[in-house]
Amino acid sequence: MSLRARLTALGQRSAEALVAQDQKVRGPVGLDAGDLKLFGALVVALAVIVWVDTFGSSSKTRVLIPLFALFVDDGAELHRGIFFQKGLGGFFRYAYWSLNVLLAYALVPFVYARFVLGRTARDLGWSTQGAVKHWRIYIVLFALIAGPLLVASQLPGFAQTYPIYRGARDSLPRFLLWELVYLPQFIGVEFLFRGFLVFPFERRMGLYAVLLPLVPYAMIHFGKPWPEVFGALAAGLVLGGIAFVTRSLWLGVAIHVSVALSMDSLATLTRWWNA
């Protein structure tokens, strides 16, 4: 069978799987008391996105000064010593952001889903079973993304944008340390936008629940190169569909991590090559 025929067959099976899953999970139409809890889930999602943007970004570390002041006489001085020191100050600022994303996007929504919506971790996509069963999806998607990534790495500004922590470009140890801090936050991103904002809504919206998080997902990419902002819509649609069919977030996490690591690696290698 030719590659074109294989891709066509894969696309047909994917479409059939989406329709089958949509028919399986869609419940009866009509409002009930659970819809108010779903509205609460939207409020929680909005709250954590606003938190990260307002207090959890790498430029908002001053929010920690009152906390530091509980333990030392001069909280502002300790803050400067950690987040604005020469060398690792930038690393700690971005580490603060990454930790906020992980906790706000994953932990807070999970607590709401578990104790208010009554959903288990498996219900929300934390199971690895579907990801293991459909591992070939990862191979196909990453193969499709590899080409555009290589092209993008040659565009002006790419090497100046990634890695977002500039110190990661200085040496291999710093690069690896940065990736250890940076990559786990994609677990939070995938859970919020492909788990928490999809699975609890599927009985009301069916397959259309995948569309619900697309706009806020694109908006968190504001400030990045415009192709990445618009690409987030397509990526969110594809990753949401994968989570919907496989009932697992982990393929999305793997794809997201692989793309981010590739972007950082290509940009860093480009800078080292041109140095």
Image (spheres, rainbow, N blue to C red):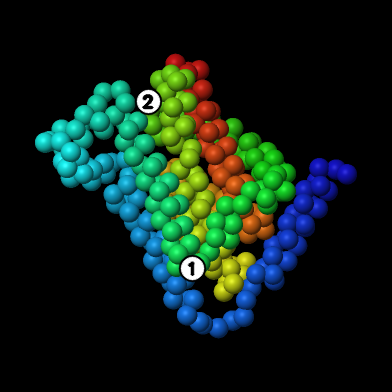
The amino acid type of the residue labelled 2 equals: Gly
Q: CA distance from mark 2 to mark 1?
A: 42 Å
Between tags 2 and 1, which lies in front? 1
Which label is found at residue 117? 1
| Residue 184 appears in the figure | yes
Nearer to the camera, 75 or 238: 75
Q: Nearer the viewer, residue 231 or 105?
A: 105
> Crowdedness of circle 2 by 10 Å Cα count: few (<14), some, many (20+)?
some
Position of 88 with respect to 173 (left or right) is left
* Label 2 close to label 1 by CB (< 8 Å): no
- Which badge, 2 or 1, comes first in the chain's sequence? 1
Image coordinates of residue 52 in percent, x first then y, are 35, 50
14 over 79 or under it: above or below: below
Residue farthest to the right? 1
Q: Compare residues 11 and 49 and report the one nearer the observer.
A: 49
Residue type, label 1: Leu
User: Residue 220, image x and y in percent?
Assistant: 42, 51
Q: Residue at x 47, y 26 (%)?
A: 176
Left or right of residue 253, residue 10 in this image = right
Looking at the image, residue 77 sits to the left or right of residue 212; the answer is left
Tell me the residue at 43%/62% (across/down): 112
- Tell me the residue that label 2 is attached to: 167
Q: What percent of the width, then of the height, locates residue 26?
A: 64, 73
